[in-house]
Amino acid sequence: MTHDPAIVPSGPRQAIDGHRLLARAVGFGRALRAAGLAVDLSSEIDFARALGVVDIGDREVVRAAGAAVFTRRRDDRPVYDRVFERYWRRRSLQPNLEAPGNEQRPEAVPSDEGTAQEGAMPGDERSDLPDDRQGIPIPTEGDADQDEAAPDVVTISPDAYSRSETMRHRDFDRMTAQELRDAERLVDLLEPKLELRRTRRYELHRHGRRLAPRAMFRQNLGNGGEILSWVWRRKVQRPRPLVVLCDISGSMERHSRLLLRFIQALSASSAVKTESFVFGTRLTRVTRLLRDRNRDRALANVADTVTDWAGGTRIGESFRDFNHRWARRTLRSSGVVIVVSDGWDRGDPRLVEIETARLRRNCHRLVWLNPLAGTPGYQPLAAGMRAAYPYIDDFLAAGTVASLERLGEILAGGRSADTRRGSEAAAQVAPSPNAVRTFSPPPRVARRPQDPFAAQPLR
Amino acid sequence: MTHALTSTDAITEAFRERGYIADRSIATAVFLGLQLGRPLLLEGEAGVGKTELAKVLAASLGTRLIRLQCYEGLDVNTAVYEWNYPRQMLEIRLLEARGQAEHATAHDIFGMEFLIKRPLLQALEAGNDGEPPVLLIDEIDRADEEFEAYLLEILSDFQVTVPEIGTIKADRPPRVILTSNRTREVHDALKRRCLYHWIDYPSAAKEFEIVQARVPAAPESLARAVVAFVHRLREADLTKVPGIAETLDWASALMALGAADLTPGLVDETLGVVLKYEEDIRQVRGDTVKAYLAEAAAGR
């Protein structure tokens, strides 16, 4: 990336001009790519064409044109603007591009422009590059190589935790490689069991319960329009998307690593869409970071990005952030939300209650994994936990592989939708937060049997 | 009257004539879309004028607007084309009745007259005899990924393949506008084929212009008060902040009520026009409304 492309040959005047534009566009595209935007050659060409048609004397128009071509999402825009400022300095824009007739000495830009051959590339671009990378605070795949040398998961794995909290079960922080593999295998087991949601799309199926007129007419055209064979269709089923909100505050520290491993394994699975977030005092989206194929590096990246490891917890604020910024984007097709937290909260329990209720209304099922819940005699008494409890559909222990197995059963949609506990509570505007319910695992009901009349077409 | 739309200024001007106040960056994106023949993907919160832009563009160009509203499960049969099977059946019967069935070939029942053209195919063909239309693919984020994948062929080559007939190609491709509310991320492959523009909420000055353009009957003081109040609401911590559409609705509603100025009582009564969530209304109604109005009065 440090070499100029040999893209500015000498030639007829007209051609030089086009090449110049292209070289500029490519250079700008490269600077953007270095800053982390997904820029490909075709957008660079587009930008060169754009420079040919807009008024390049107008800086704001050039900026808008580049934005239209190079950015792909809203979050790209601040990065783009920064690179734009750097690359298209006010003075270098016009003299270079506007007057092809002044080929002889168009570079009124200071001497750092270099020779005429590479004059189309702003010389300062290369020297600026490292700055760009530092200056833009958004971690990207492009920066991954920098993190190669980063320390491995040690940052996540705590060694200073309170002995008094030790539980009877073998916990995640002491997991051996074998057990880690087990946890991952568990995810594989879980995959085919994930709860399905009927989409609005149909597929032809012999046991469908609706007629498929199109296919039927089509198939029977060969019979001269006589309907001799019947064709059926049914709705396509897909696993519900999962959203995981994982608490990484101090009290959860010793569970974080395996839970993240578990989330990571879920994310890697192609069968189900998983969005993952971690929260302590604020919410951070880690979906993209966890997608890294190198799993240790992914965890290290998460560790580097998240700034509130092992600090306090603000469940209410974090949930609110999720509800406002992410719920609509990630729970669109009624996903399952899994919260992993012990419910120790420093914030306002009332806020936890409001936001949990809102979260519950936005999703299909709200599952709460609590590492403490495996302790015999556990009651959801922590302020945050107590506030959230009425809205939870499934309250489970997390902390051992066995408990994650139970999660697998829950995610498989063990019970029919209308027996959900959280739905009733969420529907009420102001439920009594004092109603502490005794904790017992919700009863499991066998998967709803198929409608016996469903697959019986009239023949 | 239609415009040539040969520069960003011409676009701004043409849009303004039709009551759409576009800033330079929008005008530039639209202009590039027209010049480079690229679809334009517009993202932004609900009610910032994404769909409206497509309508205004069609009006400015003096062409048809063909709109495809996306939804989950939208498929080729409803978006592109479908064979008119009942008519084909009838045709077969007719051929039989006339005793021509033996000589009939597939072409007799798989001809263009049996093809029901849906919006995308209409848009491809409309340009062949006249000005290419504006194709609005609205709320692409509501469609599922299968459909998005199908759009790739259409948006890059502007052609559709109907197996029985062949490939139908647009001689003069339609101008395509896609909109998304970001309820999910549109796939990168689709984004790569489009120009992109994020439409933000406008500044107070610009929104005031919009209100004046769209609700010309509203007195200036009322328009300013409405815009100021809505801007204050956008800073508040609400489930759903009002868009421009809500501002305009509100201004119209206030006009219908014969209001001359914003009073706390009036705001409380009409808050449902601006805020669409019960908890938001409860949060703002009463003291907060008074506080906002007092702020605005002090700032004036």
Image (cartoon, rainbow, N blue to C red):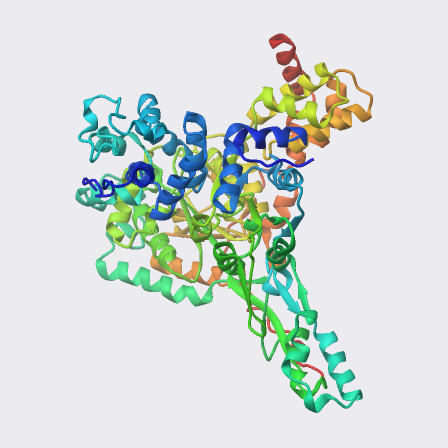
Q: Out of A318 and A442, give the one closest to the viewer.
A: A318
| Quadrant, the C terminus of chain B | top right
Give the left or right position of residue B257, taking residue A311 as reference: right
Q: How many marks?
A: 0
Which quadrant of the figure has residue B104? bottom right
The reply to whether residue B9 is visible in this rendering is yes
Q: Out of A146 and A84, give the one closest to the viewer.
A: A84
Is residue A11 placed above or below B274 in the rendered structure? below
Q: Out of B292 and A175, give the one closest to the viewer.
A: B292
Is residue B212 placed above or below B41 in the rendered structure? above
Q: Out of B107 and A332, give the one closest to the viewer.
A: B107
Is residue B100 placed above or below B253 in the rendered structure? below
In the image, residue B207 lies at what x, y percent? 62, 24
At 63% from the left and 32% from the top, the residue drawn is B15
In the image, residue B252 lies at what x, y percent? 76, 28
Give the left or right position of residue B86, taking residue B23 as reference: right
In the image, residue A393 lies at what x, y percent? 54, 52
The reply to whether residue A211 is visible in this rendering is no
| Quadrant, the N terminus of chain B | top right
In the image, residue A447 lies at what x, y percent? 55, 68
At 59% from the left and 46% from the top, the residue drawn is A361
